[in-house]
Image (tube, grey):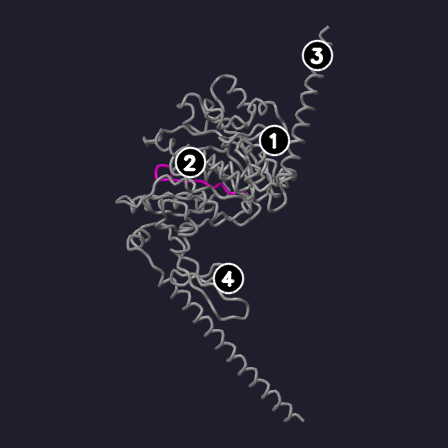
């Protein structure tokens, strides 16, 4: 019996040893080929000679291009789509061809590297990312923004493809590595091409690679004076409105009347009552106050006394506030707008038309940091973009009105914003696909509402006369 037991134990030990050796061999082989496959793909990735030089000089190394993008595989600058379930048929598309479709409305896109530098502490999706645009003369301002905000930032950094390219990227690497807050919170998406001031293209890239649910469209020169994330995400009602995708939160913007007063951000007020005091003293004013169409709909007079979130009720098509909104499901900025004038207004117009209402935060604010403006030919660009924006608004109104008719939501609140700003288009309802019978019913209803309003006005006037006797 003892001999048989020893034999059984000996056999069991041998079997265990054989199984262990087989599993170890399988794991080692699998690990080797997996690592070899990844390194081969990265090594085969096309890279410009100038990039190699720049990266070797840069204090931080940008991450390699990912091997997989969801269900599509990226190999040697190609994306491979699998066939239908159970099929071995695949289809390959080059990265360049895919980018030509993604950014087909822009002037052109020679080279974009998402996450050229990738932040280490963006780990929550329920957060607000500042999506901003940066050029070489604003690297130090981006660094300051990261230190102040200490939250996720998605920065589309544009570098002109000229003889200063390498020096510019080297400078970016130095400032990134010198600021811990940048390394923790700033994702840098590098754009290298010869097309300057493609602001809406850059906005789309910053938004596209945002890693949180919510995004704030912000110019890098603005200083955040309050804790926006606490005001929005810490308030259950405001957060719920934002999460619905039907509300964008407006943060009022200010600037100093005297440019020299707006240079040192450390002296900016951090409380609303201090802002109101400086406005009363004539030091601060609403941003671009001389051009009321740009920010007037925020209704600053109401903001000074408000303690509760309030809606924007007098929207106009030139309105371009700084907003926080839900990333998924929101429209993209039209990339045909090149240079100064109407580019951001076009973004916000389509967001509004799509059914998103604007609500203003009562206690938070931004202040513009004064700086010298570059000597660009802004007049020429503004003239071109004004003409483009006139036709763009008609185009967007007709596109969304047709969409709402087809989806049978024309007579729902989802279409209310569109109806507020698109009524001046000739034959608007006819072009949108509303039947003649329905158009006649609408005219009757509008006439009845107009008569009711006129009657109410008469009653109010009579009451005022009686009260004054």
- Image location (x, y in percent) of residue 375: 32, 30
Which of labels 3 and 2 is toward the front?
Answer: 2
Residue 303 left/right relative to 452: left
According to the image, label 4 marks what residue? 71
Give the distance between the C-alpha atoms of the residues marked 2 and 4, in whole angstroms: 38 Å
Give the distance between the C-alpha atoms of the residues marked 3 and 2, in whole angstroms: 47 Å
Q: Would you place residue 129 above or below residue 64 in this image? A: above
According to the image, label 1 marks what residue? 311
The disc label shown at residue 464, or none: 3
Single out the residue that lies furthest toward the left.
163
Residue span colored magenta: 128-138
Give the distance between the C-alpha atoms of the residues marked 4 and 1, in whole angstroms: 42 Å
Give the distance between the C-alpha atoms of the residues marked 3 and 1, in whole angstroms: 29 Å
Residue shown at the point (53%, 50%) measured from the top left? 123
- Image location (x, y in percent) of residue 30: 47, 73
Q: Would you place residue 367 above or below residue 63 in this image? A: above
Please, what secondary structure does the residue beneath circle 2 have? helix
């Amino acid at each position: 019996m003892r001999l048989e037991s020893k034999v059984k134990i000996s056999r069991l030990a041998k079997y265990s040893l054989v199984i262990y050796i087989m599993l170890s061999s399988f794991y080692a082989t699998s690990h080797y080929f997996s690592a070899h496959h990844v390194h081969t793909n990265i090594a085969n990735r096309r890279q410009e000679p100038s990039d190699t030089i720049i990266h070797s000089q840069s204090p931080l190394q940008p991450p390699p291009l990912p091997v997989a993008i969801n269900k599509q595989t990226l190999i040697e600058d190609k994306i491979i789509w699998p066939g239908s379930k159970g099929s071995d048929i695949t289809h390959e598309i080059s990265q360049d061809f895919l980018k030509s479709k993604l950014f087909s409305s822009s002037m052109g896109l020679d080279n974009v590297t998402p996450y050229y530098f990738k932040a280490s502490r963006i780990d929550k999706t329920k957060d607000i990312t500042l999506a901003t645009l940066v050029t070489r003369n604003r690297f130090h301002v981006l660094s300051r923004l990261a230190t102040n905000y200490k939250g996720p930032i998605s920065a589309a950094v544009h570098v002109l493809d000229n003889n200063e390219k390498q020096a510019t990227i080297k400078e970016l690497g130095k400032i990134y590595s010198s600021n811990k807050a940048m390394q923790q919170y700033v994702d840098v998406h590098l754009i290298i091409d010869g097309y300057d001031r493609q602001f809406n293209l850059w906005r789309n890239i910053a938004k596209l690679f945002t890693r949180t649910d919510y995004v704030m469209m912000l110019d890098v020169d603005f200083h955040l004076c309050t804790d926006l994330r606490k005001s929005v995400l810490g308030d259950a009602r405001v957060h719920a409105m934002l999460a619905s995708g039907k509300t964008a939160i407006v943060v009022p913007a200010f600037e100093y009347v005297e440019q020299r007063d707006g240079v040192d951000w450390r002296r900016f007020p951090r409380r609303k009552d201090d802002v109101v005091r400086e406005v009363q003293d004539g030091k601060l004013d609403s941003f671009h106050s001389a051009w009321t169409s740009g920010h007037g709909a925020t209704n600053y007079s109401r903001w000074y006394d408000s303690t509760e979130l309030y809606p924007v009720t007098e929207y106009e098509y030139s309105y371009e506030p700084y907003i926080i909104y839900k990333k998924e499901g929101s429209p993209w900025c039209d990339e045909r707008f090149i240079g100064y004038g109407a580019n951001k207004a076009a973004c916000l117009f389509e967001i509004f038309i799509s059914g998103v209402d604007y609500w203003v935060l009562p206690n938070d604010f931004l202040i513009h940091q004064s700086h010298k403006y570059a000597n660009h030919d802004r007049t020429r660009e503004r003239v071109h973009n004004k003409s483009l924006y006139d036709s763009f608004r008609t185009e967007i109104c007709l596109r969304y009105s047709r969409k709402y008719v087809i989806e049978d939501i024309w007579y729902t609140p989802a279409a209310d914003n569109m109806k507020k700003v698109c009524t001046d288009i000739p034959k608007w309802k006819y072009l949108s696909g509303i039947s003649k019978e329905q158009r006649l019913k609408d005219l009757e209803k509008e006439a009845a509402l107009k008569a009711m309003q006129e009657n109410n006005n008469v009653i109010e006037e009579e009451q005022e006369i009686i009260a004054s006797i």
